[in-house]
Each structure stands twice: as C-alpha cells, then as structure tokens.
Image (tube, grey):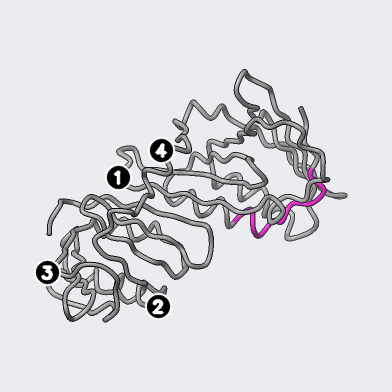
Amino acid sequence: MKITIQKVDQTNFINFINRLKVIDSFVYFKIKGGTIQASAYLPQRDAVKHHRLPISQVFQIEEGTITTTKELKVAFFDAQKLTDAFKQFEYDSIQGEIEFLENDEDFVATSFRIFNDELEIQLACSEPSLGYKDLTDSQISTIFNVDDASFKFDLEYGTLSKVKNLFGLDKEETFSIEASAKGVELTGNTYNMLVTPDFEGDGGKKVTLFKKYLSLLDKEDYTANVLDNRVVMSSNDSETLLTIATCNTGA
C-alpha cells in the first residue's frame, strides 16, 4: 500500500519528532483514528512520553486515501537524520509518499519519499519491533492514569525554567516536591522554592524525583498530578503526557 501526501507541514513534523528524540533517537509513530501519535520511553520505563495530534496538522492527505482500519506504523533508527532530511527543503513545499507492507495485524512502512520540484530524498524506514516494544492502548491508559493522585498543581514554563536554574546550585541528582498548607514547594539540598500557593488534593504529601527527567518536558505549561509512585505531567498546550517515576514512595 502507498499513501500519497499532498503536503507535509515541515515545522509541525519536525516539532513532533523533536518531542520524541529527547527520550530516544529511535523514532516510532503510528497513524491511527485520524491522528498521528507516538509513545517513547526510557529502557526501564521510569519515564514515558506520549504525544498525539490530528493527521491534518502534519500530513495533507486526500480524503478516502486511507481505506484500512489497521494501524499504520512508521519507524526510523535515527531521529536526527530524519529531521536533517526535512530541513534540506528550507521550508519549501514538501510532498511525500509512504510505502507500507501489510501484516496480519497492521501495516509497516518500508520507505518515506519526500520531494518537491527541485529535490527528492528517499528515507528508509526500519522495522518497529527492532528498536521498540509497542505499548497497547490499555498500557498507555494505565501509565497515565491519575485517579489516585494525592494532589495536582499547575507548572508554568517560566516557573519550570527557574526550577532548572536552581538545580545547578548543588550536586544532588534528586529534588523533592511537597504539598503543605503553604502550597507546593520544591526543595533540594541548598534551596526551597514555592512553586505555587494553589493546588488540589491533600497536603502533607512529598515525593522525590531525579532532576534529569525534567529535561524531557517541552517548552509548555503543564498540570502535574502527583502520585506515590509517579508524577504525570499533562501539557496545557498540546496533547502531550509525560510520566516520571518517583525515587521512593512517601507521605
């Protein structure tokens, strides 16, 4: 099967890939139910990121072109080479063709050709199972479930930047988030910062996280849902979710 793409939104596609490559250079996404979506995770699944957006924001495909209800899976070994290829077009109009092979359960892309009147680049796709174990809808639902959250609060990007600057003040690998009568505070070995006086849920709860995981967040505002074993960050600006495992459980 071949899908012809009348226009690729280069900016949105590159941004989509960049959201994933902060976790893994192996990029895997699928076209499903009118959306393009992807999940990426660290080897121990102590951080899992999920992002989705309508196909129309990335690929302009003639209506009726996709006739199957099976998932269309696309994967590349090197995210940087993928984005570099798209940048060769210097924001000129880009068209595309994706070739797929059909399996019992889905379609897997074998090549992605991008072109305009002056340039053509043939991108080889990889077999998704070689670098990635797919997450089921049920697993994704469980990973990002926040029904048992102790408390939640808003974390603006400007505040997040201040938090990251504080991290350089000590050599500790971790920091803590705690809800109290004062509000939500972030604490380290040498600092204590009031993130927000407002939160929903129970006070007296504290969790510890590794600093490195905050680099996986995009430049957006988030709602943070704090559970004993993880913190689920839900973007307020896009359909992006990030689950970060806590270092320990605690009340």
Instruction: Name the side, left or right, on which 122 lies relative to 139.
Output: right
Identify the secondary structure beneath mark 2. Answer: helix
Q: Is residue 11 magenta?
A: yes
Please report whichever mark, 4 or 3, sits nearer to the chain's N-terminal start: 4
Instruction: Name the side, left or right, on which 192 lies relative to 15.
Output: left
Cβ atoms at labels 3 and 1 below 8 Å apart:
no
Residue bearing the label numbered 4: 139
Please report whichever mark, 4 or 1, sits nearer to the chain's N-terminal start: 1
What label does residue 158 carry, if any? 2
**Residue 235 locus on image (x, y percent):** 46, 63
Nearer to me, 44 or 200: 200
Q: Nearer the viewer, mark 4 or mark 2?
A: 4
Residue pictured at 77% horizontal, 36% vertical: 3
Question: Which range is magenta?
Answer: 5-14
Nearer to me, 58 or 207: 207
The image quarter in which residue 53 lies? bottom right
Q: Residues within 10 Å of mark 2 (few under 14, many from 20)?
A: few
Residue bearing the label numbered 3: 189
**Residue 222 locus on image (x, y percent):** 41, 67
Please report whichever mark, 3 or 1, sits nearer to the chain's N-terminal start: 1
Q: Amino acid at mark 1?
A: Asp
**Residue 203 locus on image (x, y percent):** 18, 70
Estimate the spatial distance between the alpha carbons at disc 2 and disc 3, rounded to whole Å: 22 Å
Estimate the spatial distance between the alpha carbons at disc 2 and disc 1, rounded to whole Å: 25 Å
Identify the secondary structure beneath mark 4. Answer: helix
Please report whichever mark, 2 or 1, sits nearer to the chain's N-terminal start: 1
